[in-house]
Amino acid sequence: MDEQPSPPLDRRAELSEFLRTRRARLKPEDVGLPDFGRHRRVPGLRREELAQLAGVSVAYYTRLEQGNGRNVSAEVLDAIARALRLTDAEHAHLTHLAKPKAHKKKQSARPQQVRGALRQLLDSMDGIPAYIGGQRTDILAWNRMAAAVFGDWSELAPQERNWARLVFLKPEYHDLFVDWEQKAIDIVCLLRMDAGCRPDDPRLSSLVGELSVKSEDFRRLWATHDVKEKSHGVKRMRHPLVGDLSLQYESFRLPDDSEQSLVTYHAEPGSASAEALRLLASWGTDATRAGATTPQ
């Protein structure tokens, strides 16, 4: 039986919930307003207070928070973003939800392709775990060191090469990341950004539906409506073969395809993590298949 396509995400509901959750996290004193009422029926700012800060009527803001972003101007969105203290990523997400760009039909069904030169670049990065990420947190291409650190993704079906599925549905990834919660938050934030850009993407809707059914943690984090771009930082891992790893990651959005990013990991020179990476590099493909049989 053919799998039925998932319905698209409700853009109006997404806009409504995003604004409501951003408003709920602010208190009057956070934005310089007096708090005259101790008994608030809902957390955060009232709609009247937010409208006052943004310089729009209460009725106008109420319509927007109910998901009606039709004909809203960029200037009004900018004012609301400032009033809500939105980050750049949140501001972009609000704009995508309120003023969606027209996409060609079936654009999201087009296979994601990685240029041959990029694959060569990955292979040439000796000792540096690196991969190309795409839409929906898909993993499109990777090098030998990435497989040694994260597992041999070539053994997975193409649809399973996806960070969201790995983090929320694979117990071994729960064990791999020392701060699994933060990794999970990062993944959900990226999916939310993707959903704002492509609410009509059936594969994204299917992925969100699957994870919502199978993972309570995903449902909890998805309900926060938090968004952010992947940039740089430090990831601490507990590798089954070499033990603790502390790796710095960098994310580079590709200039000719903004939906793809090159992500690299490296260790501080002379550190125990750098030595561990050298050890994994010397084992090569054996490092991805050794499992729990750590050398004594």
Image (cartoon, rainbow, N blue to C red):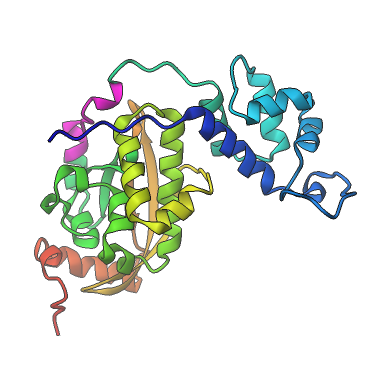
Identify the residue at image location x=26%, y=55%: 128
Vertical relation: 154 (above or below) 182? above
The magenta segment is 107-119
Decide if residue 27 is on the left or right side of residue 134. right
Query: Percent from the top left, x then y, of residue 193?
Result: 45, 37
Depth check: give the residue in front, 211 or 282: 211
Between 9 and 262, the residue placed more toward the observer is 9
The residue that appears at 31% across and 33% down in the rendered structure is 6
Give the image location of residue 39, x and y in percent: 82, 54
Task: Choose between 247 and 67: the one closer to the eye.
Answer: 67
Q: For this view, does 189 lie left or right of residue 83? A: left
Residue beneath the point at 38% across and 40% down: 252
Vertical position of residue 56 compared to residue 166: above or below: above
User: Above or below — where is 216 with respect to 105?
Assistant: below
> Is residue 222 visible from the viewing direction of this image?
yes
Residue 134 image position (x, y, % from top left): 30, 37
Q: Quadrant of the N terminus?
A: top left
